[in-house]
Image (cartoon, rainbow, N blue to C red):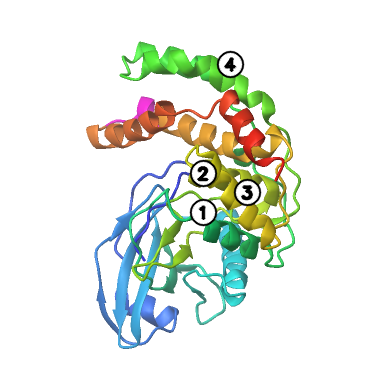
Amino acid sequence: MPTTDSASPDVPPSGRLSPVDAPEVAFVFGLGRAITLSGPVARGELGEIRQLVTDRGSWAVKQDLDPLSPADVARAEASAAFHHRCWEAGIPTPEPLPTRTGHFVAELGGEHVRAYSWVDLVDPDTSPDPGPVGELLARLHAVPAPPEGPVHDWFEAPIGEAEWKGLLKGSRAAGAPYAERLGEVLPGLVEVESILTPMRAVQTCHLDLWSDNLRRTTAGELCVIDFDSAGPADPSREVGMLLFELGQGEGARQRRLYDAYLEAGGPGLITGPADFSLTVAQLHHIGHRHLTMWLAARDPEARARSLAGVEEFLGEPFLLADVDRLVAEVAGS
């Protein structure tokens, strides 16, 4: 199940990682006798994925880059429980595996790990048939999942003009290669944040359904992965996020995805610009994170990794005119 994590509201990881013991992982999760544990097959912002092979099959082992606090573990257990309910409801997703004690997160030698059934995935693609995507999102939103806890700022709060200007000043002082581009788009970033409003906690949603996490298997089927950011949200705003990510700016694709979602009984409705608040908030927090990490980077590899994220963020920013066009395309469906 190779994958990479999207950026998330967590503190940037230190990158410290010690190898875990294959027999111990296999025993703790009840997976049989360990045969091999690969080196990382994928690395994201928050963790690495390894493939564990036992006498009972293949499994994905996710190891967090940084140790989790007790609060982090509690959130991880809650998101994994939601993931498991989705799997039980027939959502195409790897099965999250409990330990022998019934937990989803195990601490082994100071490292936090999780285990999943193995699924062979292809690379991310932002151009799948939007009809099946809309149907799958409706099925996902139909899984009974009452909201728990408050909505995180990452999903609803603006960065703010003062912070954007501070980053621009710091970037120019550091001779950042992207500084002038940031200066050009900064007024638009501030303007589009005017649509952000607090999000109603209607139900638990995935909240990280970028193309990295809505993938096809090698057999061609859609598969939802990485529920680590799941939490309270408004399904209407998650629909908006999929329309932006997989609609590709094409009205026909956007309408097909939204119509398929509604026809499949999806509860979310696009009624105005505020329904794209989740999209804007996440894009801005991800971009802000890459900008601050570039300024704080102490080695070329870390700086290059952050620069790639900065360039993606600034290359095609989601601005107010884009929001208005999207609303006009689908709000009448």
Question: Mark 2 or mark 3, which is nearer the start of the sequence?
Answer: 3
Q: Which disc, if any, is residue 130?
A: 1
- Measure how far apart labels 3 and 4 are at the Cα level: 30 Å
Q: Which disc, if any, is residue 162?
A: 4
Q: List x then y, in percent, for residue 329.
A: 63, 37
Q: Quadrant of the N terminus?
A: bottom left
Pointer 2: what residue?
247
- Measure how far apart labels 4 and 1 are at the Cα level: 38 Å
Give the residue type at disc 2: Gly
Question: Mark 3 or mark 1, which is nearer the start of the sequence?
Answer: 1
Classify 10 Å Cα crowding around label 4: few (below 14), some (14-19), many (20 and above).
few
Nearer to me, 135 or 313: 135
Nearer to me, 249 or 70: 249
Q: Which residues are magenta?
A: 293-298
Give the residue type at disc 1: Pro
Q: List x then y, in percent, for residue 31.
A: 40, 83
Pointer 3: what residue?
239
- Measure how far apart labels 4 and 2 are at the Cα level: 32 Å
Nearer to me, 61 or 220: 220
Q: Which disc, if any, is residue 183?
A: none
Classify 10 Å Cα crowding around label 1: few (below 14), some (14-19), many (20 and above).
many
Give the residue type at disc 3: Val
